[in-house]
Amino acid sequence: NEWESLAHWGDVLIWRNHIYNLVINALNDFQEMLPQMHQAGYRDKAWSVNQLGAAARKQYQYNLCISSINKLYGFNRMDVQEAFVKIREQAKAYLAGGEEVITGLNLITTTNLEYFTPEHQAEIFRLKGLFHQTLGEHGAANNSFSTALTLHRQLPEGWLSWGTFNDAMYSSSGDKAYLESTAACYLQAIRFGSVRGRGMLPRLLHLLSFENDGGEVGRAMDRQTDMPLWVLVVWIPQLLMSLQRPEVVHIKRLLVQLSLAFPQALYYALRTYLLTLRETAVKPLHEYTSAARGAKTALEQAKVAEAAKQAAIASGDQTKIAETTAAASAATQTARTLQAALPEKPGEVVAFEAGREVMEAVRSKHGSLVQVLENLLTEIGSRFVPKPAERLLAVVHMLLHRCYKAPCANVAEVPASLKKELGGVCKACFSPEQVAKHGWEMQQHRDSFVRDLDPESEHFPATLGKLVEGLKGWKARL
């Protein structure tokens, strides 16, 4: 456990370090006969020291991390993998400490990369870029990140670091070129499996919503066709809400892809969204349709007037030419005016149409699954309908609330408005249709409820206080 006390780490690993020293010394005589066993001692010792340094760094003991890695090993030779881990841990400690950044940069710069794999070399250049970025050397940082990804294109942390660098540069300078690079780098980091890169999805959606005036983020997202769609599942509500914003074109494409890959994850949220939006989109859609119909009619009338004008010109009748020319000019002007006054399609309408396209994609690709989901929804709705006694209890709670809000004393007569409401409740809850529908469940309460709370009954409470007591009794009974 990396968060165990460093004293515990020290007890375990320093004892191991002592044992490894004994093993290395004991196998010195067998170096030529059993070189693999001899190297194993060095490798295990270096691993223990690096683990101690990593634990110290993660517990914010940066000086302890650097000193333990430098001093506890004590040999000139080291396995290549462990040598890389040693350099990486030291560099991270220098970066996190913030006081000896120059020393860390010198460590990276003087490292001989000849023995490392391209992936290790790329990681070292990434760390070098972070040092340059910390020192404010933006050009050198950009070059280092570029070199890292040239050496190993599938380095997720490299893409993430470069994206963070471009994001910071865009925030400070406002240069749109950095914005497109930011989106592209974040998307590549997500594509290659960076966990921290997936954490940048909210930032990416924010940039798409509020910083995409020139289409930079949208273009980057459209070019990234192989992003793993499962990372978007937890962001489905945010994606659906983005359908009402200018980025609807890009979001709709993502939702269509998501609906084909994960229909069950999207279907319920999309269905609820469309049902909610349909109510709010009715009026804007009617207004827009009426305006569009008027503009279309005016355009057709202008075409008819222009045709009549051409016929008059062909006939040579000057009187008709003058009349048709004036009519054509007036019709054309009216059509232009209506076309110019035609409003943009309301956001609710655009969102509803986009959501409906996504739903049609789900239904066309997964028709059988959609039918099963609809049946499941119907079954859930029928099974979770409140029972008659539960509905009656809700009515009693509502009536008690009305009594508490009544502007009169408990000894006063029951207000007329409350009597009227009680009468309506008795008729609605215990009508012949309700009794026939629910049978004995309503019949067992009907007579006593009507006797106690129907204003036309002889036993109806004379005062508001007695009515409250009666309602409390029914509340306890139900």
Image: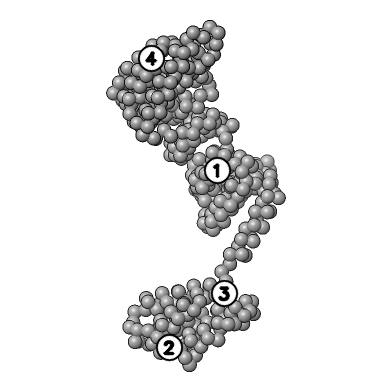
Q: CA distance from mark 2 to mark 1?
A: 58 Å
Q: Position of residue 433 (x, y in %)?
A: 62, 79
Q: Looking at numbered disc 3 in the image, what kind of residue is underneath it?
A: Pro
Q: CA distance from mark 2 to mark 3?
A: 24 Å
On the picture, is 58 further left or further right than 150? left
Residue extending farthest to the left is 99
Which residue in the structure is indicated by mark 2?
461
Counting other residues with Cα less than 10 Å from the Cα at mark 1, is it few (<14), some (14-19), or many (20 or more)?
Answer: some
Distance in Å between CA atoms under marks 4 and 3:
81 Å
Relative to 474, residue 343 above or below = above
Residue pictured at 60% horizontal, 62% vertical: 381
Q: Which amino acid, by three-letter code, is at mark 4?
A: Gly
Identify residue for label 3. Answer: 388
Image quadrant where one finds the N terminus: top left
As helix, strand or loop, the secondary structure at mark 3 comes to helix
Q: Residues within 10 Å of mark 4 (few under 14, many from 20)?
A: few
